[in-house]
Amino acid sequence: MTKKLLLFALSITVSTSFSKDILLECGTTTRTSFNGWTIYPYNVFDNVIFTDETIDFHAGNNGGDFTISLTRKIEAMKEYAELNLAVEINSIHGCIIHSIDAFVSEDGKNWALVELDQSNFQASFQNENLNYQFLKIAVNVSFEPSGYLQIGYVKVEGSTNWEMELIEPEPQIISNPFFVFCFNKTINVETKSEQPYDVIFSSISGQIVYTETAIGSTRIETDLPEGIYVISIFQNGEFLQSKKVIF
């Protein structure tokens, strides 16, 4: 309500002020992880490490050419006629990034290319019909054996003309219907979801050591040796959460 009153006051004075609203920001220095993004592929790599602020892809002994995609629904984009995108993806060692492409979509099925500047991986583009609500980032990369790529940062902004009557976008709330806890080397997953999901055990170095697909609440008992593990939950290819446990 406060923002709408301010917009009205500015329109009376015929102000011509512009600003950028951050619709989504995650990655390095933000203290926000990539929860909520759909990531593909992840099971072709030896190690995929989800940290608090990055996603690290470690290729196996053979390397290879891959297109890694990250997709997310950002409903707040529909409120802005001009959008800005900034991406940071780093070749840590043993890989070559050929290009980073960006796409937007109204329904998550039909995609329009965003002209991303390949020198700084930034773009400004129009959303004149106010219908875009999905974003996809595609990384075309060649891995040498044991190559290492890091997804570091993504920011989406909407440009606002304060002379326009705008509605403050509702904050995007991502519900996570899974609760994971450990007791005596037994992993318990509590959920009301009726859809299949994957439970992935990784060592502290990121090595995938055990996977299981489940429906509904489940209890997993393993014979893994004592140590520190990261339990990750995926559903429909979307990374939902991770939890560090000690056996």
Image (tube, helix red, strand yellow):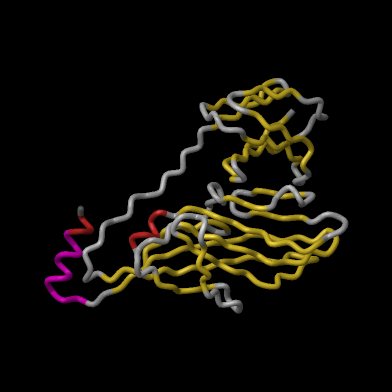
Q: Residue 211's image quarter?
A: top right
In magenta segment, residue 6? yes
Q: Residue furthest right?
A: 61
Q: Residue furthest front?
A: 110
Q: Residue at x 50, y 55 (%)?
A: 108
Residue 154: horizontal and vertical position, in percent?
A: 54, 62
* 31 relative to 226, above or below: below
User: Residue 239 or 65: which is nearer the viewer?
Assistant: 65
Residue 224: horizontal and vertical position, in percent?
A: 81, 29
User: Residue 26 or 95: which is nearer the viewer?
Assistant: 95
* Left or right: 137 in relation to 221: left
How many labels sit on residues?
0
In magenta segment, residue 220? no
User: Residue 183 or 156: which is nearer the viewer?
Assistant: 156
Name the quarter where the C terminus is drawn. Answer: top right
* 234 relative to 113, above or below: above
Q: Residue at x 64, y 65 (%)?
A: 89
Q: Residue at x 58, y 25 (%)?
A: 216
Residue 35: horizontal and vertical position, in percent?
A: 55, 47
Q: Main secondary structure of the magenta part?
A: helix
- The stretch of residues the image draws in magenta is 5-15
Residue 219: horizontal and vertical position, in percent?
A: 66, 22
Q: Residue at x 76, y 55 (%)?
A: 58
